[in-house]
Image (cartoon, helix red, strand yellow):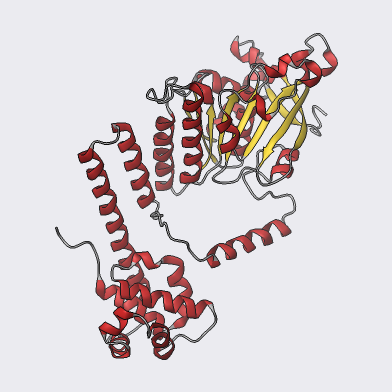
Amino acid sequence: MKEQPQDLNAERAIVACMIVNSDIIGEVCARLSENDFYMGIHADVFNVCKKLWTNGQSVDIVTVNNELKNNKIYAEKGGVNWLSRLVDSLQTTAGYRSYIDIVREKSILRATLKAAMQIANDVSEQSKTAKEILDNAQQELFAVASENVKDNSLTEIYKDIVVAVQNIEYLHSNRSAVPGLASGFVDLDKRIGGFQNGELIIIAGRPSMGKTAFALNIAENVATAGKAVAVFSLEMSRKLLIQRLLSSVSGMSASKLKYANIADNEWAELSNAAQALGNMNILIDDSADSTAFDIRSKSRNCANKLKTKGKHLDLIVIDYLQLLRGDSSIKDKNNQIADISRQLKSLARDLDVPVIVLSQLSRAPEQRGVKNSIPVLSDLRDSGAIEQDADVVLFVWREGYYKPNDDTVQRNAKIRIGKNRNGACGDIDLIFEATQTKFFNKENEQYG
Protein backbone atom coordinates (compact mmCIF):
# COMPACT_ATOMS: atom_id res chain seq x y z
CA MET A 1 0.00 0.00 0.00
CA LYS A 2 1.21 3.50 -0.86
CA GLU A 3 2.22 5.82 1.98
CA GLN A 4 -0.59 7.98 3.30
CA PRO A 5 -0.69 11.67 2.34
CA GLN A 6 1.64 13.70 4.58
CA ASP A 7 4.29 16.41 4.52
CA LEU A 8 6.72 15.98 7.41
CA ASN A 9 8.67 19.08 6.44
CA ALA A 10 5.57 21.24 6.86
CA GLU A 11 4.79 19.54 10.17
CA ARG A 12 8.30 20.18 11.48
CA ALA A 13 8.15 23.76 10.27
CA ILE A 14 4.87 24.63 11.97
CA VAL A 15 5.82 23.23 15.39
CA ALA A 16 9.20 24.99 15.10
CA CYS A 17 7.34 28.25 14.37
CA MET A 18 5.26 27.76 17.51
CA ILE A 19 8.42 27.45 19.62
CA VAL A 20 10.21 30.38 18.00
CA ASN A 21 7.22 32.77 17.87
CA SER A 22 4.57 32.14 20.52
CA ASP A 23 2.46 35.03 19.16
CA ILE A 24 1.17 32.78 16.37
CA ILE A 25 0.15 29.88 18.63
CA GLY A 26 -3.45 31.09 19.02
CA GLU A 27 -3.99 31.17 15.27
CA VAL A 28 -2.29 27.82 14.74
CA CYS A 29 -4.44 26.16 17.43
CA ALA A 30 -7.58 27.67 15.93
CA ARG A 31 -6.85 26.01 12.58
CA LEU A 32 -5.10 22.78 13.53
CA SER A 33 -5.53 20.02 16.06
CA GLU A 34 -3.23 17.20 17.13
CA ASN A 35 -5.12 14.87 14.78
CA ASP A 36 -3.92 16.86 11.77
CA PHE A 37 -0.33 15.69 12.30
CA TYR A 38 0.81 12.48 10.64
CA MET A 39 3.83 11.95 12.93
CA GLY A 40 3.00 11.43 16.59
CA ILE A 41 6.03 13.32 17.96
CA HIS A 42 4.98 16.42 16.00
CA ALA A 43 1.52 16.18 17.52
CA ASP A 44 3.15 15.88 20.97
CA VAL A 45 5.19 19.05 20.44
CA PHE A 46 2.07 20.84 19.17
CA ASN A 47 0.13 19.81 22.30
CA VAL A 48 2.92 20.92 24.62
CA CYS A 49 3.14 24.35 22.96
CA LYS A 50 -0.63 24.75 23.15
CA LYS A 51 -0.69 23.72 26.82
CA LEU A 52 2.10 26.12 27.80
CA TRP A 53 0.54 28.99 25.82
CA THR A 54 -2.94 28.35 27.23
CA ASN A 55 -1.57 28.42 30.77
CA GLY A 56 0.25 31.68 30.11
CA GLN A 57 3.70 30.10 30.40
CA SER A 58 6.75 30.81 28.26
CA VAL A 59 7.11 28.69 25.12
CA ASP A 60 10.74 27.95 24.19
CA ILE A 61 13.16 25.06 23.84
CA VAL A 62 13.71 24.83 27.59
CA THR A 63 10.02 24.69 28.59
CA VAL A 64 9.04 22.39 25.73
CA ASN A 65 11.92 20.04 26.50
CA ASN A 66 10.94 19.97 30.16
CA GLU A 67 7.37 18.95 29.27
CA LEU A 68 8.58 16.22 26.88
CA LYS A 69 11.35 14.73 29.03
CA ASN A 70 9.26 11.69 29.97
CA ASN A 71 8.09 11.09 26.40
CA LYS A 72 9.63 7.81 25.24
CA ILE A 73 9.51 8.60 21.51
CA TYR A 74 11.00 12.05 22.15
CA ALA A 75 13.89 10.43 24.01
CA GLU A 76 14.43 7.95 21.15
CA LYS A 77 14.57 10.84 18.69
CA GLY A 78 17.41 12.40 20.66
CA GLY A 79 15.57 14.59 23.15
CA VAL A 80 16.70 18.20 23.37
CA ASN A 81 19.28 17.70 20.61
CA TRP A 82 16.50 16.69 18.20
CA LEU A 83 14.41 19.64 19.34
CA SER A 84 17.32 22.05 18.82
CA ARG A 85 17.94 20.74 15.31
CA LEU A 86 14.23 21.11 14.55
CA VAL A 87 14.25 24.76 15.62
CA ASP A 88 17.61 25.54 13.95
CA SER A 89 16.35 24.18 10.63
CA LEU A 90 13.72 26.92 10.54
CA GLN A 91 14.93 29.94 8.60
CA THR A 92 11.87 32.18 9.16
CA THR A 93 8.38 32.04 10.70
CA ALA A 94 6.94 34.26 7.97
CA GLY A 95 5.48 31.33 6.05
CA TYR A 96 3.65 29.74 8.98
CA ARG A 97 0.20 30.17 7.36
CA SER A 98 1.39 28.21 4.33
CA TYR A 99 2.66 25.44 6.62
CA ILE A 100 -0.77 25.33 8.31
CA ASP A 101 -2.49 25.00 4.93
CA ILE A 102 -0.20 22.15 3.87
CA VAL A 103 -0.63 20.20 7.12
CA ARG A 104 -4.41 20.67 7.02
CA GLU A 105 -4.61 19.68 3.36
CA LYS A 106 -2.75 16.42 3.98
CA SER A 107 -4.94 15.73 7.01
CA ILE A 108 -8.11 16.12 4.92
CA LEU A 109 -6.70 13.79 2.26
CA ARG A 110 -5.93 11.16 4.91
CA ALA A 111 -9.45 11.50 6.29
CA THR A 112 -10.87 11.09 2.78
CA LEU A 113 -8.75 7.98 2.23
CA LYS A 114 -9.89 6.56 5.57
CA ALA A 115 -13.54 7.15 4.63
CA ALA A 116 -13.01 5.54 1.23
CA MET A 117 -11.38 2.49 2.79
CA GLN A 118 -14.28 2.13 5.23
CA ILE A 119 -16.75 2.31 2.35
CA ALA A 120 -14.80 -0.33 0.41
CA ASN A 121 -14.68 -2.54 3.51
CA ASP A 122 -18.45 -2.23 4.08
CA VAL A 123 -19.12 -3.13 0.45
CA SER A 124 -16.78 -6.14 0.62
CA GLU A 125 -18.24 -7.50 3.86
CA GLN A 126 -21.87 -6.99 2.71
CA SER A 127 -23.00 -7.06 6.33
CA LYS A 128 -25.08 -3.90 5.82
CA THR A 129 -27.78 -3.00 3.35
CA ALA A 130 -26.94 -0.86 0.33
CA LYS A 131 -28.89 2.05 1.84
CA GLU A 132 -27.00 1.78 5.13
CA ILE A 133 -23.68 1.75 3.29
CA LEU A 134 -24.69 4.78 1.18
CA ASP A 135 -25.90 6.65 4.25
CA ASN A 136 -22.70 5.95 6.20
CA ALA A 137 -20.57 6.85 3.17
CA GLN A 138 -22.34 10.14 2.63
CA GLN A 139 -22.12 10.99 6.32
CA GLU A 140 -18.38 10.31 6.43
CA LEU A 141 -17.66 12.26 3.25
CA PHE A 142 -19.85 15.15 4.37
CA ALA A 143 -17.83 15.34 7.57
CA VAL A 144 -14.62 15.54 5.55
CA ALA A 145 -16.07 18.12 3.17
CA SER A 146 -17.08 20.24 6.15
CA GLU A 147 -13.53 19.96 7.55
CA ASN A 148 -15.11 18.46 10.60
CA VAL A 149 -13.66 14.98 10.69
CA LYS A 150 -15.09 13.08 13.62
CA ASP A 151 -12.83 12.85 16.66
CA ASN A 152 -13.83 10.46 19.41
CA SER A 153 -11.44 11.97 21.94
CA LEU A 154 -12.36 14.58 24.50
CA THR A 155 -11.25 18.07 23.50
CA GLU A 156 -10.38 21.17 25.48
CA ILE A 157 -13.12 23.78 25.72
CA TYR A 158 -11.17 27.03 25.52
CA LYS A 159 -12.27 27.79 21.94
CA ASP A 160 -15.92 27.20 22.82
CA ILE A 161 -15.62 29.41 25.89
CA VAL A 162 -14.52 32.35 23.73
CA VAL A 163 -17.52 31.84 21.42
CA ALA A 164 -19.91 31.48 24.38
CA VAL A 165 -18.71 34.71 26.00
CA GLN A 166 -18.95 36.58 22.69
CA ASN A 167 -22.53 35.34 22.30
CA ILE A 168 -23.40 36.48 25.84
CA GLU A 169 -21.89 39.91 25.14
CA TYR A 170 -23.96 40.19 21.95
CA LEU A 171 -27.20 39.22 23.70
CA HIS A 172 -26.44 41.65 26.53
CA SER A 173 -26.06 44.56 24.11
CA ASN A 174 -29.01 43.46 21.92
CA ARG A 175 -31.81 42.83 24.38
CA SER A 176 -34.36 41.92 21.69
CA ALA A 177 -32.13 39.19 20.25
CA VAL A 178 -32.54 35.49 21.07
CA PRO A 179 -29.74 32.90 21.41
CA GLY A 180 -31.09 30.70 18.63
CA LEU A 181 -32.95 31.04 15.34
CA ALA A 182 -35.94 33.36 15.85
CA SER A 183 -39.31 31.85 14.93
CA GLY A 184 -40.92 35.27 14.50
CA PHE A 185 -43.33 34.59 17.36
CA VAL A 186 -42.07 36.92 20.07
CA ASP A 187 -43.41 35.22 23.20
CA LEU A 188 -42.37 31.78 21.98
CA ASP A 189 -38.85 33.00 21.21
CA LYS A 190 -38.58 34.56 24.66
CA ARG A 191 -39.62 31.30 26.29
CA ILE A 192 -37.44 28.85 24.32
CA GLY A 193 -34.67 31.23 23.21
CA GLY A 194 -35.32 30.51 19.55
CA PHE A 195 -34.49 27.25 17.82
CA GLN A 196 -30.98 26.01 18.60
CA ASN A 197 -28.64 24.35 16.13
CA GLY A 198 -28.68 20.58 16.50
CA GLU A 199 -32.13 20.54 18.09
CA LEU A 200 -35.04 18.32 17.09
CA ILE A 201 -38.27 20.30 17.48
CA ILE A 202 -41.62 18.52 17.32
CA ILE A 203 -44.76 20.47 16.38
CA ALA A 204 -47.76 18.28 17.13
CA GLY A 205 -51.50 18.65 16.90
CA ARG A 206 -54.72 16.93 15.94
CA PRO A 207 -55.82 17.15 12.25
CA SER A 208 -56.95 20.62 11.13
CA MET A 209 -55.43 22.34 14.18
CA GLY A 210 -53.00 24.28 11.98
CA LYS A 211 -49.66 22.59 12.61
CA THR A 212 -48.70 22.82 8.92
CA ALA A 213 -49.75 26.48 8.85
CA PHE A 214 -47.73 27.20 11.99
CA ALA A 215 -44.63 25.47 10.60
CA LEU A 216 -44.96 27.34 7.29
CA ASN A 217 -45.35 30.62 9.17
CA ILE A 218 -42.08 29.89 10.98
CA ALA A 219 -40.37 28.99 7.68
CA GLU A 220 -41.62 32.24 6.14
CA ASN A 221 -40.45 34.31 9.13
CA VAL A 222 -37.01 32.67 9.07
CA ALA A 223 -36.65 33.14 5.31
CA THR A 224 -37.80 36.76 5.56
CA ALA A 225 -34.84 37.32 7.90
CA GLY A 226 -32.52 36.23 5.07
CA LYS A 227 -32.03 32.61 6.20
CA ALA A 228 -32.23 29.42 4.10
CA VAL A 229 -35.02 26.95 4.85
CA ALA A 230 -35.56 23.46 3.42
CA VAL A 231 -39.17 22.23 3.55
CA PHE A 232 -39.98 18.54 3.03
CA SER A 233 -43.71 18.09 2.50
CA LEU A 234 -44.99 14.54 2.35
CA GLU A 235 -48.66 15.53 2.55
CA MET A 236 -49.12 18.76 0.62
CA SER A 237 -47.95 19.46 -2.95
CA ARG A 238 -45.47 22.18 -3.85
CA LYS A 239 -48.30 24.03 -5.63
CA LEU A 240 -50.48 24.17 -2.51
CA LEU A 241 -47.56 25.15 -0.29
CA ILE A 242 -46.67 28.06 -2.55
CA GLN A 243 -50.32 29.10 -2.68
CA ARG A 244 -50.41 29.16 1.12
CA LEU A 245 -47.18 31.15 1.27
CA LEU A 246 -48.55 33.66 -1.26
CA SER A 247 -51.67 34.07 0.86
CA SER A 248 -49.59 34.62 3.96
CA VAL A 249 -47.19 37.12 2.37
CA SER A 250 -49.88 39.07 0.49
CA GLY A 251 -52.52 39.03 3.22
CA MET A 252 -55.06 37.82 0.67
CA SER A 253 -57.34 34.94 1.58
CA ALA A 254 -56.35 31.47 0.45
CA SER A 255 -59.75 30.87 -1.17
CA LYS A 256 -59.42 34.11 -3.17
CA LEU A 257 -56.14 32.85 -4.62
CA LYS A 258 -57.47 29.35 -5.15
CA TYR A 259 -60.39 30.53 -7.29
CA ALA A 260 -58.59 33.60 -8.69
CA ASN A 261 -61.26 35.96 -7.35
CA ILE A 262 -58.87 38.89 -7.52
CA ALA A 263 -59.99 42.46 -8.05
CA ASP A 264 -58.15 44.69 -10.51
CA ASN A 265 -56.61 46.75 -7.72
CA GLU A 266 -55.26 43.62 -6.00
CA TRP A 267 -52.98 42.41 -8.77
CA ALA A 268 -50.18 44.77 -7.81
CA GLU A 269 -50.37 43.51 -4.24
CA LEU A 270 -50.16 39.90 -5.44
CA SER A 271 -47.24 40.75 -7.73
CA ASN A 272 -45.34 42.37 -4.84
CA ALA A 273 -45.98 39.33 -2.67
CA ALA A 274 -44.78 36.98 -5.42
CA GLN A 275 -41.60 39.01 -5.83
CA ALA A 276 -40.97 39.05 -2.07
CA LEU A 277 -41.57 35.31 -1.84
CA GLY A 278 -39.32 34.68 -4.85
CA ASN A 279 -36.48 36.48 -3.09
CA MET A 280 -36.76 34.20 -0.06
CA ASN A 281 -34.41 31.24 0.18
CA ILE A 282 -37.07 28.55 0.67
CA LEU A 283 -36.36 25.17 -0.91
CA ILE A 284 -39.27 22.72 -1.24
CA ASP A 285 -39.31 18.96 -1.78
CA ASP A 286 -42.79 17.42 -2.08
CA SER A 287 -41.79 13.79 -2.67
CA ALA A 288 -44.61 11.78 -1.09
CA ASP A 289 -42.83 8.46 -0.61
CA SER A 290 -39.75 9.62 1.29
CA THR A 291 -37.73 7.89 4.00
CA ALA A 292 -35.64 9.45 6.73
CA PHE A 293 -32.63 8.32 4.70
CA ASP A 294 -33.90 10.27 1.67
CA ILE A 295 -34.34 13.43 3.70
CA ARG A 296 -30.91 13.10 5.32
CA SER A 297 -29.32 12.63 1.89
CA LYS A 298 -31.16 15.56 0.28
CA SER A 299 -30.46 17.81 3.27
CA ARG A 300 -26.73 17.13 3.12
CA ASN A 301 -26.71 17.81 -0.63
CA CYS A 302 -28.64 21.04 -0.05
CA ALA A 303 -26.20 22.12 2.69
CA ASN A 304 -23.23 21.40 0.40
CA LYS A 305 -24.72 23.36 -2.51
CA LEU A 306 -25.45 26.34 -0.29
CA LYS A 307 -21.93 26.17 1.10
CA THR A 308 -20.44 26.51 -2.39
CA LYS A 309 -22.40 29.79 -2.67
CA GLY A 310 -21.05 31.05 0.63
CA LYS A 311 -24.33 30.35 2.42
CA HIS A 312 -25.53 27.71 4.84
CA LEU A 313 -28.73 25.83 5.61
CA ASP A 314 -30.42 27.39 8.64
CA LEU A 315 -33.60 25.34 9.17
CA ILE A 316 -35.20 22.08 8.05
CA VAL A 317 -38.99 21.53 8.23
CA ILE A 318 -40.54 18.07 7.73
CA ASP A 319 -44.30 17.57 7.35
CA TYR A 320 -44.89 15.04 8.79
CA LEU A 321 -43.28 12.25 10.81
CA GLN A 322 -45.90 9.50 10.45
CA LEU A 323 -45.88 9.79 6.64
CA LEU A 324 -42.19 8.96 6.41
CA ARG A 325 -41.71 5.46 5.09
CA GLY A 326 -40.01 3.30 7.71
CA ASP A 327 -37.50 0.50 7.45
CA SER A 328 -39.45 -2.51 6.13
CA SER A 329 -37.22 -4.86 8.13
CA ILE A 330 -38.66 -3.33 11.33
CA LYS A 331 -42.11 -4.84 11.66
CA ASP A 332 -43.41 -2.97 14.71
CA LYS A 333 -44.81 0.51 13.86
CA ASN A 334 -43.64 2.02 17.15
CA ASN A 335 -40.10 0.78 16.54
CA GLN A 336 -40.21 2.13 12.98
CA ILE A 337 -41.17 5.58 14.24
CA ALA A 338 -38.49 5.35 16.93
CA ASP A 339 -35.88 4.57 14.26
CA ILE A 340 -37.05 7.50 12.11
CA SER A 341 -37.01 9.82 15.13
CA ARG A 342 -33.42 8.87 15.95
CA GLN A 343 -32.34 9.44 12.34
CA LEU A 344 -33.89 12.92 12.30
CA LYS A 345 -32.22 13.79 15.58
CA SER A 346 -28.94 12.59 14.07
CA LEU A 347 -29.61 14.81 11.03
CA ALA A 348 -29.98 17.87 13.27
CA ARG A 349 -26.70 17.06 15.02
CA ASP A 350 -24.77 16.20 11.83
CA LEU A 351 -25.76 19.37 9.96
CA ASP A 352 -25.87 21.49 13.13
CA VAL A 353 -29.23 23.03 12.26
CA PRO A 354 -32.66 23.01 13.94
CA VAL A 355 -34.93 20.35 12.47
CA ILE A 356 -38.68 20.93 12.89
CA VAL A 357 -40.79 17.79 12.45
CA LEU A 358 -44.57 17.79 12.48
CA SER A 359 -46.29 14.92 14.24
CA GLN A 360 -49.78 13.57 14.66
CA LEU A 361 -51.43 13.05 18.02
CA SER A 362 -53.59 10.20 19.22
CA ARG A 363 -57.35 10.68 19.71
CA ALA A 364 -56.87 11.10 23.46
CA PRO A 365 -57.43 14.91 23.51
CA GLU A 366 -60.97 14.51 22.08
CA GLN A 367 -61.68 11.61 24.39
CA ARG A 368 -60.89 13.80 27.41
CA GLY A 369 -63.53 16.35 26.40
CA VAL A 370 -63.21 19.99 25.34
CA LYS A 371 -62.11 21.31 28.75
CA ASN A 372 -59.13 18.94 28.84
CA SER A 373 -58.39 18.78 25.13
CA ILE A 374 -55.09 20.70 25.22
CA PRO A 375 -52.50 18.02 24.34
CA VAL A 376 -49.90 16.55 26.66
CA LEU A 377 -46.73 14.57 25.90
CA SER A 378 -48.44 11.20 26.31
CA ASP A 379 -50.70 12.09 23.35
CA LEU A 380 -47.79 11.85 20.87
CA ARG A 381 -48.74 9.12 18.45
CA ASP A 382 -46.96 5.80 17.82
CA SER A 383 -43.81 6.08 19.93
CA GLY A 384 -42.43 7.39 23.22
CA ALA A 385 -39.12 7.78 21.38
CA ILE A 386 -40.46 11.00 19.82
CA GLU A 387 -40.71 12.56 23.27
CA GLN A 388 -37.32 11.17 24.24
CA ASP A 389 -35.44 12.39 21.15
CA ALA A 390 -37.08 15.81 20.93
CA ASP A 391 -35.43 18.84 22.51
CA VAL A 392 -38.60 20.91 22.21
CA VAL A 393 -42.20 19.76 21.80
CA LEU A 394 -44.83 22.34 20.77
CA PHE A 395 -48.55 21.55 20.70
CA VAL A 396 -50.88 23.55 18.45
CA TRP A 397 -54.37 23.99 19.92
CA ARG A 398 -57.32 26.08 18.73
CA GLU A 399 -60.42 26.48 20.85
CA GLY A 400 -62.51 27.28 17.78
CA TYR A 401 -61.93 23.76 16.42
CA TYR A 402 -63.99 22.38 19.31
CA LYS A 403 -66.52 25.24 19.29
CA PRO A 404 -67.28 25.82 15.58
CA ASN A 405 -70.46 27.81 16.31
CA ASP A 406 -68.87 30.23 18.76
CA ASP A 407 -67.59 33.20 16.74
CA THR A 408 -65.90 34.75 19.79
CA VAL A 409 -63.24 32.01 19.97
CA GLN A 410 -62.54 31.28 16.31
CA ARG A 411 -59.31 33.32 16.29
CA ASN A 412 -58.00 32.08 19.64
CA ALA A 413 -54.92 29.88 19.36
CA LYS A 414 -52.48 28.45 21.84
CA ILE A 415 -49.03 26.96 21.52
CA ARG A 416 -48.28 24.76 24.49
CA ILE A 417 -44.59 24.09 25.17
CA GLY A 418 -44.87 20.50 26.35
CA LYS A 419 -41.12 19.93 26.54
CA ASN A 420 -38.22 22.34 26.62
CA ARG A 421 -34.96 20.60 27.35
CA ASN A 422 -33.15 23.85 28.09
CA GLY A 423 -35.86 25.95 29.69
CA ALA A 424 -39.36 26.32 31.03
CA CYS A 425 -42.61 25.04 29.58
CA GLY A 426 -45.94 26.88 29.40
CA ASP A 427 -48.56 28.31 27.06
CA ILE A 428 -48.19 30.99 24.37
CA ASP A 429 -51.34 32.76 23.17
CA LEU A 430 -51.54 33.60 19.45
CA ILE A 431 -54.14 34.81 16.96
CA PHE A 432 -55.21 32.52 14.10
CA GLU A 433 -56.62 34.03 10.92
CA ALA A 434 -58.37 31.14 9.13
CA THR A 435 -58.76 32.91 5.77
CA GLN A 436 -54.98 33.13 5.48
CA THR A 437 -54.23 29.98 7.52
CA LYS A 438 -51.81 32.20 9.42
CA PHE A 439 -50.83 32.71 13.04
CA PHE A 440 -50.02 36.15 14.47
CA ASN A 441 -48.44 37.40 17.65
CA LYS A 442 -51.09 38.26 20.22
CA GLU A 443 -50.10 41.94 20.33
CA ASN A 444 -50.20 42.33 16.53
CA GLU A 445 -52.02 45.62 15.93
CA GLN A 446 -53.99 44.40 12.96
CA TYR A 447 -55.40 41.42 14.79
CA GLY A 448 -54.92 42.41 18.46
Please say if 87 is above or below 12: below
Task: Say which quarter of the image contains residue 49.
Answer: bottom left
Residue at the spot 72% in from the left edge and 23% down from the top edge: 397
Residue 94 seen in the figure: no
Residue at the spot 40% in from the left edge and 67% down from the top edge: 32
* Count of numbered marks: 0
Depth check, front residue: 166 or 63 = 63
| Residue 266 position in % (x across, y down) | 66, 19
Depth check, front residue: 40 or 318 = 40
Please say if 16 is above or below 175: below
125 left or right of 380?
A: left
Residue at the spot 75% in from the left edge and 20% down from the top edge: 373
Quadrant containing the N terminus in the rendered view: bottom left
170 left or right of 296?
A: right
| Residue 292 position in % (x across, y down) | 44, 30
Quadrant containing the C terminus in the rendered view: top right
Please say if 135 is above or below 91: above
Residue at the limit of the structure toward the right, as seen here: 408
Depth check, front residue: 97 or 130 = 130
| Residue 160 position in % (x across, y down) | 55, 62
| Residue 332 position in % (x across, y down) | 46, 22
101 left or right of 320?
A: left
Residue 401 seen in the figure: yes
Residue at the limit of the structure toward the left, as seen here: 1
